[in-house]
Amino acid sequence: MALDWPGWGRSGKTEDEALTALAEYAQRYAKVVQDCRVGFDPALADTLDVVEQVNGNRTTEFGAPAMPVSADSKPVSQADAERTAVLIQACWDALDAMAARSAASLLKGPRGGGRDRDKMVDHVIGAEVAYARKIGVKHKQPSVDDKEAIAAMRGDILQLLGNRSDGGLLVEKGWPVAYTARRIAWHATDHAWEMEDRQP
């Protein structure tokens, strides 16, 4: 998981496999953020540095960035928060664009599983409802075709993540805003890429 680039994250059974996967996805991530004018260079993948390791849990075993790191408790400046909001929006846009041009029925995974398009989008939206509550943003889960409600929820999320933070938790047993931003962005790109890879 790249700390400075929400949405650029991959997993692997070992550290080396995870870093290799992250590097291999640099070009795909570049396409996601190409219109953001944030200066992402895929060549960053040539010099990846491991700055922190944390113990995972059952969620980590499924490839999700389940644990915050110590950097997530540091203050976030207004400029960095606004940059993060731009990157999150780009990840949402990538997912929405892929869903719009995707077949409704997707190829099954190696073991015959995997959600079809609408169920995948519904899953992402449901996860965002849960993630938002970790920073004090409460919405009922919108249906996949309720664009207005989805936009309202995401707007409230960005309103909070796009403003500076002292790094502290906003709600009891919640998540740091920096970690929340990475988790949301990762989930959107992860499923956008899955949807792309499973086109019939």
Image: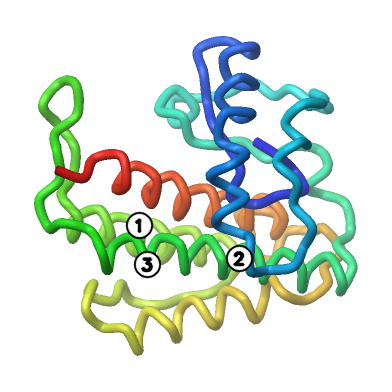
Q: Earlier in the sequence, mark 1 or mark 3?
A: 3
SS under mark 1: helix
Residue at left offset 86%, top offset 74% = 78
Q: Nearer the viewer, mark 2 or mark 1?
A: 1
**Residue 110 image position (x, y, % from top left):** 19, 21
**Image quadrant in which you'd find residue 37:** bottom right
**Residue 164 image position (x, y, % from top left):** 83, 72
Quarter holding the C terminus? top left
State yes or no: discs 2 and 1 in contact (Cβ < 8 Å). no
Q: Amino acid at mark 2?
A: Ile
Q: Earlier in the sequence, mark 2 or mark 1?
A: 1
**Residue 26 image position (x, y, % from top left):** 62, 38
**Image quadrant in which you'd find residue 9:** top right
Distance (Cα) linking label 2 and label 1:
17 Å
Q: Earlier in the sequence, mark 3 or mark 2?
A: 3
Of residue 125 and residue 103, the one placed in the foreground of this image is 103
Other-residue count near label 1 (Cα within 10 Å), few / some / many at <14 / 14–19 / ≥20: some
Residue at left offset 12%, top offset 58% = 104
Q: Nearer the viewer, mark 3 or mark 2?
A: 3
Tell me if residue 42 comes above or below residue 22 in the rendering. below
Of residue 200 and residue 64, the one placed in the foreground of this image is 200
Residue position for label 1: 124
**Image quadrant in which you'd find residue 79:** bottom right
Residue at left offset 37%, top offset 48% = 191
How many numbered circles does the render carry? 3
Residue position for label 2: 135
Quarter holding the N terminus? top right
Q: Amino acid at mark 1?
A: Val
Of residue 176 and residue 194, the one placed in the foreground of this image is 194
Residue position for label 3: 97
Distance (Cα) linking label 3 and label 2:
27 Å
Residue at left offset 78%, top offset 68% = 81
